[in-house]
Amino acid sequence: MKHVHRATCSVALCAAVAALTAQGASPQYTIAFKAFPPRNTDIFIAAADGSRIRPVAPDPALDYNASFSADGQWIVFTSHRAGSADLYRVRPDGTGLERLTDDPAFDDQGAFSPDGKRLAFVSTRRGQADIWTLDLDTRKTALVIGDPGGDFRPAWSPDGQRIAFTSDRQPAARSCPSTTEPGPGPFVTPQYTSVYVARADGSDVRRVSSESETAGGPRWSADGSRIIAYTAAIDAVCRGDLMFGRGPSQIVSIDWRTGRRDLVTQGPGLKVFPTWLPDGGVAYTTRAGLAFSDGRAEVTGDFGRPDWNLSGTMVVFHRETDRASDQERAFKPWHSPDPRFGLLRLNGHASFAPTGDRLVFAITNYAGEVRNGQLVVAAADGSNRRTIYEGPVTDDLAGPAWSPRGDQILFGIGGFFQRASIRTARLMTIRPDGNELIPLTSEIGNAGMPSWSPDGTHVVYRVVDGSTRGLRILEVATKTTRALETSSSYDTFPSWSPRGDWIAFTSKRDGDYEIYRIRPDGTQLQRLTRLPGPDAHPSFSPDGEWIAFATGSQGFKDEAIGLVIGALPPQFQPYGEIAVMRADGSDFHVLTDDSIEQGTPVWIPAQVAPR
């Protein structure tokens, strides 16, 4: 018999449960998580000058990455309207909507072959982003281009004999150096991409962009002799020039056989996603909108991954339609492939009250040069929101963690992430009504990422000393601390099991971020994950049976720069899925499969699995 805490099911939680019930099962658990933009993009079509904009097949779910068929009769795009990311096609007037793929994996970035009989697309059917083809008559799929790295953005040559694509299979580096400035830190996996060409069957792969640059967005010239792409300096990646959309980047035209290149643009600013126009000119995207190589006036507005029809009279693109702030935005049920686990997308790193009827979540203000945060308490369905704490503009905010007794909320304020090595931070408690703000640790040192013991008498947290990170356990009543010795100089994101027997945490002791667990007395250290890419943010299920965490094991699924255009905040790490495993590390499987960053999973206590 399923054991359920006596807490009413919130509207958002019931919606998540109902979505899974419609698939034939009610979830035993529900995991809430934070995801970065986009929130709700739709497909739009407009005249070539950006006028007469109208939606095409709008839907409350995410729609993005649209492109025309060669004859202009179809638009292919990615949609989550049936749950997972799948490919659809529709007529430009919005009629004839048809689902093309129906697979639990992430299917995206569809591109029609010149004869309209096949579709090249990106899919994670093998666990990472590869390029596949779909026969539109038989609906048979075939793997064409695969590599342990990610392959993205397929583009057919005009004769249909070759495919140009972007790949991060030969990265210039695996991490960025330490920095105290906003941007990629050593905890961020940088993406270095190059442009390649292969035969349509996947053979004869060759790199056509330079090893000394990062490049992407390939498109063919009408005669098939040249490829146009955007490029930027290698060091622009770790400087954050691409992440923040500052540039500079340039558009280049490359003879793919000889490597000879011509510079199409010059000067400062971000210039990406080029397209050849019928008159031989080039259109491309900037932070402001659409720009043109022939000097015509720039078209301002948000144009996500624009694509022109062959005659150059229409442009199709995606655009964010949810402009609400994180303070105002509704929570959103999310597709889960496993009927045991419901998913709920939240607006910030959250923690639920032990009764499951309320939550607190952190909102970070990215509008200024310095981040600061707020704590918002709300009903579990997102209603009755109230800010109970707003930090000074000099302080980051991390956490929060609702106490097991329900009377306190624990969080960290000060310098976190890039600034952790040069700023102090301390743990604070506050009552759920916003009263009694009390420091739990001193202003000396840098304390953050706290987790309560199940009886509420102790807190485990991480401390920073220069470039090292370690774990401490604090007795709340006496405020005395002791080190949790793990034989590592880089441990963070601790999570105390509700059974009290284990503490899970993230460690970089073996050169990669992996999940470990250890007894609270410092014995029986065990490594739980051995996955490519970073694993972080472990969180125990209410019964202690499972650990949810964020994993980068699937890598990037698109060019990261594509998620910067029109996004605030920018995509710091446009990779990361929500995964689960047993508390001993077994039965690992990924629950989400998307191209956006998802992390900081927490479990909703209103549903507890049978013991």
Image (spheres, grey):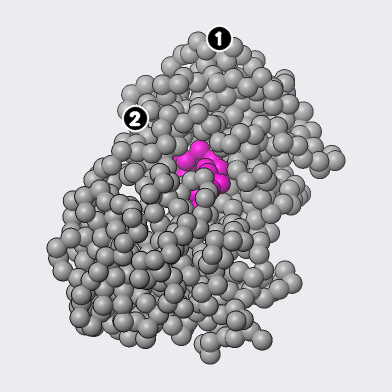
The part of the image, by quadrant, that contains residue 402 is bottom left
Task: Answer above or below: position of 368 versus 134.
Answer: below
Where does label 1 land, which residue? 258
Where does label 2 land, which residue? 235
Q: In the figure, is residue 30 to the left or right of 94?
A: left
Answer with mark 1 or mark 2, whichever residue precedes in sequence: 2
- Disc 2 marks a residue whose amino acid type is Asp
- Disc 1 marks a residue whose amino acid type is Thr
Secondary structure of the residue carrying numbered label 1: loop
Q: Residue at x 47, y 82 (%)?
A: 356
Seen from the viewer's position, the closer of residues 521 and 320 is 521
The part of the image, by quadrant, that contains residue 190 is top left
Task: Answer above or below: position of 587 versus 42.
Answer: below
**Mark 1 neighbour density, 10 Å: few (under 14) some (14–19) many (20 or more):** few
Seen from the viewer's position, the closer of residues 329 and 5 is 5
Residue 100 visible, this orientation? yes
Q: Which residues are magenta?
A: 551-563
Q: Residue furthest right?
A: 138
Q: Residue at x 55, y 76 (%)?
A: 13
Residue 378 visible, this orientation? no
User: Which x, y percent locates residue 404?
Assistant: 39, 82
Q: Main secondary structure of the magenta part?
A: loop
Instruction: Determine the CA span between mark 1 and mark 2.
Output: 26 Å
**Considering the image in quadrants, where does the C terminus appear?**
bottom right
Q: Which mark is residue 417?
A: none
Q: Residue at x 50, y 29 (%)?
A: 170
Task: Answer above or below: position of 96 versus 439.
Answer: above
User: Which x, y percent locates residue 379?
Assistant: 44, 80
State yes or no: residue 165 in magenta: no
User: Which x, y percent locates residue 39?
Assistant: 50, 57
Q: In the figure, is residue 30 to the left or right of 399?
A: right
Q: In the figure, is residue 378 to the left or right of 108?
A: left
